[in-house]
Image: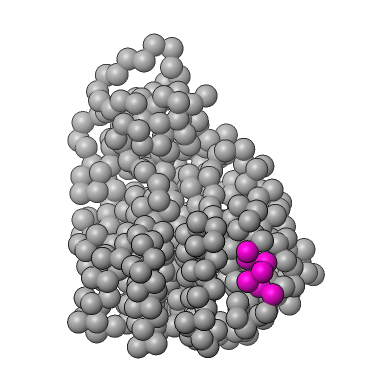
Amino acid sequence: MTDLLLRDALLWHPGSAGDSLTDVLIRAGRVAAVGPGLEAGDVPVEGLGGRLLLPGFVDAHAHVDKTLWGGPWVPHDAGPGLQGKIRNGVEARPALGLPNPGYITALLQQMVACGTTHARTHVDVDTAMGLAAVHAVREAVARLDGRITVDLVAFPQAGLLTAPGTAELMDAALAEGADLVGGIDPAGLENDPVAHLDVVFGLAGKHGAGVDIHLHDGGPLGVWQYELIIERARALGMRGKVTISHGFALGEAAPAVQERVIAGLAEAGVSLATVAPAAAAPLPLVALREAGVPVGAGNDGVRDLWSPYGDGDMLERALFLAQRGRFVRDEEIEIALEAATLGGARVTGRRAGFAPGDPGDFAAVPARTAAEAVCVRPVRSLVVKGGRVVARDGRLV
Ligand SMILES: [Zn+2]
């Protein structure tokens, strides 16, 4: 069923929730018409009774391969810092049976029930397990049978230059169809940013893939790597195909530096993904929005060896984003919701919204405005993927 008529919805556009009830007709999985009182013959109808209709949530930064969702509760005991977490993740994984297609399936189901219709997940590729995580994620995505679409990033979590053999495995993952090349702290973890970016962008060029680089490094070192990545994207003409994830350095930087970096991001067409962490300076979302830099939000790891937190809900992530940005006005809170929906779509190169031709991916919530939806985080009344009802009242269909 990819034809569907959504009846009597309040459509959310950033800056306004309509105040009149509108219908959305989806044909062959895409928006065909929008307006009041649409007639569509024998197309199935879902009455929304005035609920707020949002574009489907996009989780623009996930690590579903690592999850323990649906499995045992594992107390967190990783050592401090990035290196401690990386080591713990690799060492504790085998005894817990990770990566586990069953856990990944359970998490994806939970994400769909929460209204997420598309995700970009980083997937660990390392010399200890080869491509096992890539295969596990693929298997889980297949089990979801189209209820969610997922892009895979071949991600060198345990290092690339510092872990010889990893580049070859990433090459193999991309040859098997992984969508993007991952990178991680070219300076702070890898100690050679130029060589790291040579490998990452070399693989991207070879496979025609996008790039998504984890950049935790803060301070001037982090800002310098922003500029190295911007320069690569510009030189290689990769507008719209390069994302910096986390990018804490931008939130910490002085206003003049922020202004320079944001102008560079906008000019080179580099996007950002944030998980709104409690312990880092938030990205300057308002300035980024004004400059037209796409910003997506993501849940990062959900209940895994890196963190016991999270439940896959992007509306909760929008709340965190709003709180950490100290947003209180409706129009500010909507910027956070935008990152969780339309922003993530831009980061992942997808259309989204209510225009004819946009994908029939939506989540309906019992709220009157976008800000109310973020603050209350009501159960998702209906989730639609490509015109197909995939969840209802918080449960997978
Ligand atoms: Zn991450």
* Residue 34 at x, y percent in the picture: 28, 27
State yes or no: residue 386 in magenta: no
Magenta range is 165-171
* Residue 16 at x, y percent in the picture: 20, 45
Q: Is residue 175 visible?
A: yes
Compared across the picture, whether 193 is left or right of 128 comes to left
Identify the image quadrant of the C terminus: top right
Tell me which residue sits at (67%, 79%) in the image: 164
Judge by depth and name the residue closer to the eye, 209 or 1.
Answer: 209
**What is the count of numbered marks?**
0
Tell me which residue sits at (30%, 65%) in the image: 268
- Which SS does the magenta portion mostly show? helix
* Residue 121 at x, y percent in the picture: 54, 58
Query: In which quarter of the view is residue 32 placed?
Result: top left
**Colour theme:** one colour
* Residue 372 at x, y percent in the picture: 30, 50
